[in-house]
Image: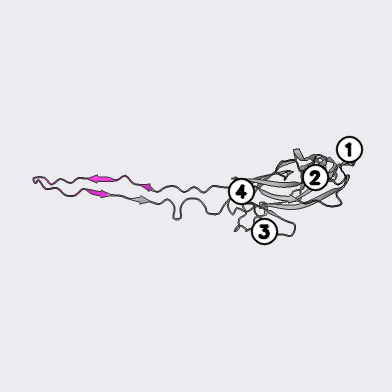
Amino acid sequence: MPRIRITLPLITAGVVATALAVLGTTSTMSALTDTAALNLGQGGIGTDVPFGIVTVHPDGTVHHAPPGAAAAVPLTGDDAFVPGRSLSVDLGVANNSPGVAAQVTMTIGPSDAAGTGQVGSAPNITPFIRVTVVDTSTGQLLLGGSASDPSQGVSVGAANAVIGRLGARGAAPLTDGDTWAPGAADSRRDLTIVLYYVDTPETSAYNGGATALEVVFDGSSSS
């Protein structure tokens, strides 16, 4: 989740009221009072730089999600995506926080409001999609049974993976639409996402089918 900035209230010293009596007279003096206020930290405690993760698209541009939301990137289809074939998408995911590390997970799932992957009146091929994800930065297979055989991918309903810890960016954060500028070496991972359309007798009835999918990255602050 995004880091929340906490501002501590001022600490106020207890008010001391002293009545000074002058012995031997009936006159009095006004009470003496004193109030002291202390600010913790010269500019407050915390940072005004929000915690966040960004995606890096194949053209090298950086994309943000709205504050408090996951970073969602739609996966577009291909007219040649027929049973027995696959398509792939390359994406980067990076920690955009200058001084805070992030733990990042990813989910690939339907992007429609009903959560089924339905596109208009087209036959819904979502149940026949298999997903493979490879972290090309580390060579780790994040989803699927084989990095080279997409038919061994997992179903859309099981497409959840842990990317792991991304170090703090160690540089000024990037804004939406910026050209990617490198930060610390461990603050970014590059992924290849492969979608495979299974070739079975059943899929012959889904000619002209479609699916609406997206990949969502969730990040939480980490030490």
Q: Which residues are magenta?
A: 11-33
Q: CA distance from mark 3 to mark 2?
A: 44 Å
Residue 29 part of the magenta segment:
yes
Main secondary structure of the magenta stretch: loop
Q: Quadrant of residue 16?
A: top left
Callout 1: SS: helix
Q: Which residue is mark 1?
A: 202
Determine the residue positioned at 68% across, 47% down. 217
Q: Which residue is mark 3?
A: 182
Which dot, 3 or 2, sits closer to the camera?
A: 2
Instruction: Please report whichever mark, 3 or 2, sits nearer to the chain's N-terminal start.
Output: 2
Instruction: Please report whichever mark, 1 or 4, sits nearer to the chain's N-terminal start.
Output: 4
Q: Which residue is mark 4?
A: 101
Q: CA distance from mark 1 to mark 4?
A: 46 Å
Residue 112 part of the magenta segment:
no
- Name above or below for residue 20 compared with residue 62: above
Residue type at the position of mark 4: Ala
| Label 2, residues with CA under 10 Å away: few <14, some 14-19, many ≥20 | few
Q: Position of residue 138 (x, y in %)?
A: 74, 48
The reply to whether discs 3 and 2 touch (Cβ–Cβ < 8 Å) is: no
| Label 1, residues with CA under 10 Å away: few <14, some 14-19, many ≥20 | few
Residue type at the position of mark 1: Glu
Residue type at the position of mark 2: Ser
Instruction: Please report whichever mark, 1 or 2, sits nearer to the chain's N-terminal start.
Output: 2
Residue type at the position of mark 3: Pro
Q: Which residue is mark 2?
A: 121
